[in-house]
Image (cartoon, coloured by chain):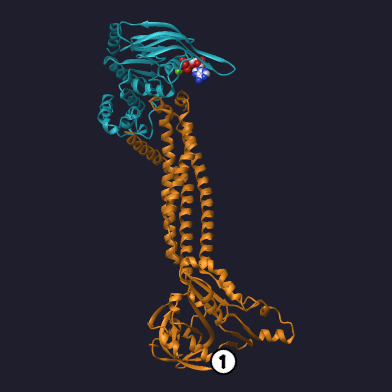
């Protein structure tokens, strides 16, 4: 599958400057992410997974190196430009769901569109479809407080899809969930992958990594292992698990 | 599109304020009290000054009132020698008719001069006797003082020319002397220390409440005599002589005053102030002591206006200070809110919000606190002012400018004190903010 690359990073370096000491979190990473791929990023604590994901999500800038997202060099963009990229091309799923408490389900799903200048009255149906897609069609006006953890994470998934992003980024998306709920969320992610969406998931959990088509292992801010699985392998594994 | 986004931001702001009703209410309290105080105090101040201005206007802005007063030499302690005793006992002083004519002739812009003679007497009718003030004056007295005829007519020129025994009585005297029945064409007896005269009642006059106090005898200042009997000046002079000798029984003082008061009316208000030195000049001729005082309503009006400007400035300072305190309170709460909602800010930033979006969001929330607080303050202050008017009867006037200023200041406070918390929110590092528990 010679798909086009959504992400290209070259010699990506991040050094946290704490004044007295400098903490190198990423030490010159190189890889590409293809469109439609499902990649898991693994590694021990402190290996730089979150740091990498923050840079890929345009929440942070690398100290050195190149980061091409789509066709644009985003490593040197201004804060305002990065906000635009985040809002238009990236869908975030967080470990702690991070819904906005005073907004209901449909309003939470709409938030990224608001910052793209799109009014909720024009996109209500679109948001409602996404809510139905994650199985919350009957909870549209519920507040996050009134939902279970799994349900909240479903809302977060719907929210990450609302702006038709280039890719979805998730940092430990099932870290706060019990195993049955975890399976439900992972099934939704599988579904999205099947639809052709690009997924990048940071995880400690082998159950998550098993579903991915590629696993990048980080160690001390460097790529330790980069394992690509055949699509068929992955599917057969899944079938085996479900059986 | 931007307008709609701003409206949505306001809606969202209202929503998050409603989420913490009690906190929002307490935060707004400073604003409410500050704005309410401005509205109420300005309304009360305006009302009081309006009432005072009305009173002064009743005296006539085009008028100057000159009254006879006892000169300093007659007020000093008795020395024991005969001359000083005599000067005190038999006091000749005050305005003369020649003063009136000299003013009329030498001061430019004077349209009319109204001389007045007064004398304390008793009015008697049908076995009722009421202490009164006998006033000799000209037919145009009512126009000068803006007094109003209730019945009959005021003294006319014919009566003045023929020295008629005609009189007009004040309404309160009519009520006390005639107790219900019609005084018109009835006769009253005016009884003094050594005289008794009969006058026919031609009319009843309702004076402006404050005017009644003015034509008082020198020496009886501060004592309100509401019972007045008006007779033609010519009649007064022929009956009681050129010099009006007033004997107060009891304190054995004999006072002689030719005119107790001269009212000068000018053509226009503008003529009044430039003419004051000339009036002084005209009166100085032929006297070595200042035995008169000049009351200039227009000057008092100006003084009142200045006083009001000072009061208003004072109120504005107080208002600004209380609004400042309110603003600081709001800023404090907004800073706490920003800290409390750090994670939300991080989420919004991750979902595409720019720093400007975050700034606007928090600025709008502060602005809403101030606007809602301002609105409650305005209605509260207004209601208080109306309630006070209802209770005390003093007029209160809610000024449009005070409402606009209070709102304007609320907005300004919201912008000034909201900007810092909003910018602080906007400049949080998105990653740090997201990690915030
Ligand atoms: N803001 C920061 N300032 C200084 N050092 C940091 C900062 N954020 C991360 N680091 C350091 O960078 C390294 C990588 O951290 P990172 O959070 O990316 O690890 P991780 O792989 O996500 O770990 P975990 O699995 O525990 O989440 C660590 O040594 C960490 O101490
Ligand atoms: Mg991490």
The answer to whether residue A53 shows anywhere in this view is: yes
Q: Which of the pair B190/B380 is nearer the observer?
A: B190
- Percent coordinates x, y for residue B337 in the rendering: 46, 36
For the N terminus of chain B, the quadrant is: top left
Q: Quadrant of residue B393?
A: bottom left
Is B102 above or below relative to B52? below
Residue at numbered disc 1: B193
Residue at image location 53% in from the left, 83% down from the top: B117
Q: Position of residue B330 (x, y in %)?
A: 48, 42
Cβ of mark 1 under 8 Å from ligand 1: the answer is no
Q: Colour of chain A?
A: cyan
Residue shown at 57%/87% (left/top)?
B243
Task: Place residue A196 in its image quadrant.
Answer: top left
Residue A224's spot in the image, x, y percent? 44, 6
Q: Is residue A95 visible?
A: no
Q: Nearer the viewer, residue A236 or A142?
A: A142
Tell me if A135 is positioned left or right of A26 in this view: left
Q: Colour of chain B?
A: orange
Chain ID for label 1?
A: B
Q: Which residue is found at the position 26% from the left and 31% from the top? A: A122
How packed mark 1 is, by other alpha carbons closer than 10 Å (few <14, some 14-19, many 20 or more), is: few
Q: Where residue B296 appears, x then y in whole percent?
A: 53, 69
Q: Is residue A17 above or below residue B392?
A: above
Q: Residue at x 38, y 19 (%)?
A: A170
Does residue A139 sit above or below B305 in this rendering? Answer: above
* In the image: residue B246, left or right of residue B18: right
Q: Secondary structure at mark 1?
A: loop
Number of numbered discs on residues = 1
């Amino acid at each position: 599958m010679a798909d086009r690359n959504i992400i290209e990073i070259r010699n990506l370096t991040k050094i946290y400057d704490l004044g007295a000491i400098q903490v190198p979190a990423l030490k010159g990473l190189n890889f590409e992410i293809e469109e439609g791929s499902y990649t898991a990023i693994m590694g021990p604590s402190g290996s730089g997974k979150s740091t990498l994901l923050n840079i890929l999500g345009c929440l942070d800038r690398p100290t050195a190196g190149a980061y091409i997202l789509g066709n644009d060099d985003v490593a040197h963009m201004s804060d305002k430009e990065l906000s635009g990229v985040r809002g238009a091309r990236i869908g975030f799923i967080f470990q702690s769901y991070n819904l906005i408490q005073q907004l209901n389900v449909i309003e939470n799903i709409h938030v990224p569109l608001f910052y793209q200048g799109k009014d909720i009255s024009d996109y209500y149906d679109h948001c409602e479809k996404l809510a139905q897609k994650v199985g919350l069609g009957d909870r549209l006006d519920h507040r996050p407080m009134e939902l279970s953890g799994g349900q909240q994470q479903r809302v977060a998934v719907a929210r990450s899809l609302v702006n038709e992003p280039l890719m979805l980024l998730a940092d430990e998306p099932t870290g706060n969930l019990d195993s049955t709920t975890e399976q439900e969320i992972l099934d939704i992610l599988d579904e999205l992958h099947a639809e052709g969406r690009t997924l990048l998931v940071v995880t400690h959990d082998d159950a998550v990594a098993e579903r991915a088509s590629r696993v990048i292992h980080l160690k001390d801010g460097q790529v330790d292992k980069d394992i690509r699985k055949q699509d068929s392998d992955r599917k057969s594994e899944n079938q085996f698990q479900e059986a | 599109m931007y307008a709609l986004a701003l409206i949505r931001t306001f809606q969202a702001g209202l929503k998050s304020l409603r989420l913490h009703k009690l906190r929002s209410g307490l935060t707004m309290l400073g604003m409410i009290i500050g704005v309410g105080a401005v509205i109420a105090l300005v309304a009360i101040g305006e009302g009081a000054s309006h009432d005072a201005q009305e009173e002064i206007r009743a005296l006539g802005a085009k008028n100057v009132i000159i009254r006879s007063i006892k000169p300093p030499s007659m007020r000093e302690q008795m020395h024991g020698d005969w001359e000083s005793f005599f000067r005190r006992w038999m006091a000749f002083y005050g305005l003369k008719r020649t003063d009136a004519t000299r003013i009329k002739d030498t001061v430019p812009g004077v349209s009319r001069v109204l001389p007045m003679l007064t004398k304390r007497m008793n009015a008697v009718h049908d076995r009722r006797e009421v202490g009164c003030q006998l006033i000799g004056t000209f037919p145009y007295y009512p126009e000068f003082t803006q007094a109003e005829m209730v019945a009959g007519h005021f003294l006319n020129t014919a009566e003045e020319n023929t020295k008629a025994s005609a009189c007009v009585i004040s309404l309160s005297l009519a009520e006390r002397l005639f107790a219900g029945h019609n005084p018109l064409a009835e006769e009253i007896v005016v009884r003094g220390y050594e005289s008794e005269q009969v006058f026919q009642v031609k009319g009843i006059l309702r004076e402006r409440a404050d005017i009644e106090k003015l034509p008082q005898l020198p020496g009886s200042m501060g004592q309100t005599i509401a019972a007045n009997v008006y007779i033609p000046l010519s009649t007064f002079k022929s009956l009681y002589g050129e010099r009006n000798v007033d004997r107060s029984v009891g304190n054995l003082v004999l006072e002689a005053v030719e005119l107790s008061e001269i009212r000068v009316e000018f053509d226009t208000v503008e003529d009044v102030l430039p003419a004051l030195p000339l009036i002084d000049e005209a009166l100085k001729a032929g006297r070595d002591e200042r035995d008169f005082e000049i009351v200039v309503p227009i000057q008092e009006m100006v003084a009142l206006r200045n006083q009001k400007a000072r009061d208003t400035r004072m109120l504005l300072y107080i208002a600004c200070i209380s609004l400042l305190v309110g603003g600081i309170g709001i800023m404090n709460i907004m800073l706490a809110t920003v800290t409390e909602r750090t994670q939300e800010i991080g989420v919004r930033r991750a979902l595409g919000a720019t720093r400007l979006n975050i700034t606007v969001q928090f600025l709008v929330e502060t602005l809403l606190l101030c606007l809602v607080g301002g609105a409650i303050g305005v209605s509260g202050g207004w209601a208080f002012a109306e309630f006070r008017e209802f209770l005390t009867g003093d007029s209160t006037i809610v000024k449009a400018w005070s409402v606009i200023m209070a709102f304007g200041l609320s907005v300004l406070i919201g912008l000034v004190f909201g900007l810092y918390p909003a910018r602080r929110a906007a400049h949080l590092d998105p990653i740090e903010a997201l990690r915030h528990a």
